[in-house]
Image: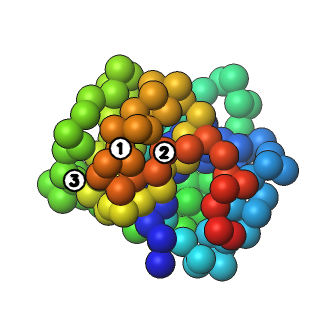
């Protein structure tokens, strides 16, 4: 089963915006066609982002989003994360690289340019970094 790591922007598309571009991805996750991974840090980041006034989400909705995502993922403890051999320009996004590196071969789906810029290097370690969910075998 293919290992998958999703950054926070993709999670917002899945759980906050219900973006039609990721509906097949969400269905594939629910059907367990991928093995999705998250780190404790990425879960904390998601909690922080969805609590921002910009999204106007009530506490119950925030809790629901976090519970949905946690139910679909395997959480990796910080002690079990292996640092990727490359560093992201955005330190907040490093955790997604480290998670993908830990569970490789893996697909990391992200819209973040700092992560996408590392796609060539990551591919040498059997990590596909892409923003295009339509490339996935769902």
| Tally of numbered tags | 3
Quarter location, residue 31: bottom right
Image quarter in which the C terminus is found: bottom right
Compared with 43, 32 (above or below) is below
**Residue 39 placement (x, y as % from top left):** 35, 52
The residue indicated by pointer 2 is: 129
Q: Residue at x 34, y 38 (%)?
A: 121
Q: Position of residue 87 (x, y in %)?
A: 27, 29
Q: Residue at x 35, y 44 (%)?
A: 122
Mark closer to the chain start, 3 or 2: 3
Q: Label 2 near label 3: C-beta < 8 Å?
A: no
Seen in the image, is 68 located left or right of residue 56? Answer: left
Report helix, strand or loop for mark 3. Answer: loop
- Could you tell me if the residues under marks 2 and 1 are in contact, i.e. CB atoms within 8 Å? yes
Residue 81, numbered label: 3
Categorize mark 2 by other alpha carbons within 10 Å: few (<14), some (14-19), many (20+). Answer: many
- Colour scheme used in the picture? rainbow
Secondary structure type for disc 1: helix
- Indicate which disc, 3 or 1, sits on the residue closer to the N terminus: 3
- Most extreme residue toward the right, as rendered? 20
């Amino acid at each position: 089963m293919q290992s998958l790591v999703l950054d926070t922007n993709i999670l917002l598309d899945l759980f906050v915006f219900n973006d039609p571009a990721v509906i097949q991805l969400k269905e594939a996750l629910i059907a367990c066609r991928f093995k999705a991974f998250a780190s404790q840090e990425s879960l904390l980041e998601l909690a922080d982002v969805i609590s921002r006034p910009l999204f106007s989400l009530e506490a119950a909705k925030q809790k629901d989003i976090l519970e949905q995502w946690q139910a679909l993922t395997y959480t990796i403890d910080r002690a079990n994360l292996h640092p990727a051999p490359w560093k992201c320009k955005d330190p907040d996004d490093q955790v997604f690289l480290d998670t993908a590196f830990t569970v490789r071969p893996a697909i990391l789906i992200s819209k973040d340019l700092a992560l996408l810029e590392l796609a060539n290097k990551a591919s040498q370690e059997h990590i596909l970094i892409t923003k295009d969910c339509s490339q996935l075998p769902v």
